[in-house]
Image: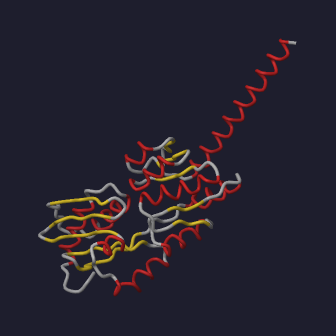
Amino acid sequence: MSDGVDHNALLGAVVGVEAQSEHPIARAIVDAAMAEGPPITAPDSFEALAGMGIKAHAAGQDLLIDAARLMTLEGIKTGEFEKRVEALASAGQTAIYVAQNGKIAAIVGVSDPVKPSARQTVDALKSYGLRVVMITGDGQATADAVAHALGIDDVVADVMPDGKRAAIIELQRNGKVGFVGDGTNDAPALAQADVGIAIGTGTDVAIETTDVVLTSGDTTGVVKAFAISRTTMRNIRQNLFWAFAYDVTLYR
């Protein structure tokens, strides 16, 4: 929090703004901030900028909330906070800036804890001979830290929603691509992938765009879905083989 900023007032305004969004990061910020019991202020205006963040007006203040790309677009300087942001990134956290009336008022560190089953899921997919790639809107340093924990070697970071779709198109040059996502920003990639898999605890947009919906947030469901599809295709091939063999036998 910057000096001279009313902590409770700003926190209450941020909660009021983020409560209007269904993005997982927004939910996390609201849940964490509510523990401090700030006086919540509903925004007078709210605009979600796809892949960028939020622009709003609350408690008489113009607010911008999200990563550095939105601040850069709006001409707001973030350089003096570089070391703090780097420290967050090295810990696998994404830095979310809160700008108030054109100046950085606070920085929020947000992390998505690696689920115990996530590394197991990645290893299982690799055992099937699949290439696992992380595609994320997070900064490169944050993405690299998470990818290292998961055993993922290929990372495409700091991309907008259309950038995720472009990354899928590039991967499709080498074969079929399945994409797993749960957020609004994942919708273009889910639609572009040969098989889109949405986490059931994700946003409605992601779920409506996808081919397969996992009923829970457990990532091992991805492996189960892949195993079921392989078994199904094997049974289809076996049935076709015996059907053709039967027909050929009768023909003779």
Nearest to the observer: residue 70 or residue 57: 70
With respect to residue 182, does 212 lie above or below? above
Nearest to the observer: residue 141 or residue 224: 141
Nearest to the observer: residue 170 or residue 128: 170
Residue 99 left/right relative to 85: left
Counting from the top left corner in percent of width and height, residue 38 is at 21, 69
Counting from the top left corner in percent of width and height, residue 41 is at 16, 64
Instruction: Name the image quarter holding the N terminus.
Output: bottom left
With respect to residue 72, does 31 lie above or below? above
Counting from the top left corner in percent of width and height, residue 46 is at 21, 59
Colouring style: secondary structure
Instruction: Name the image quarter holding the C terminus.
Output: top right
Residue 28 left/right relative to 158: left
The residue that appears at 39% across and 84% down in the rendered structure is 82
Residue 27 left/right relative to 137: left
Q: Give the quarter of the image for residue 232.
A: top right
Q: Give the quarter of the image for residue 6.
A: bottom left
The residue that appears at 21% across and 73% down in the rendered structure is 10
Counting from the top left corner in percent of width and height, residue 164 is at 48, 58
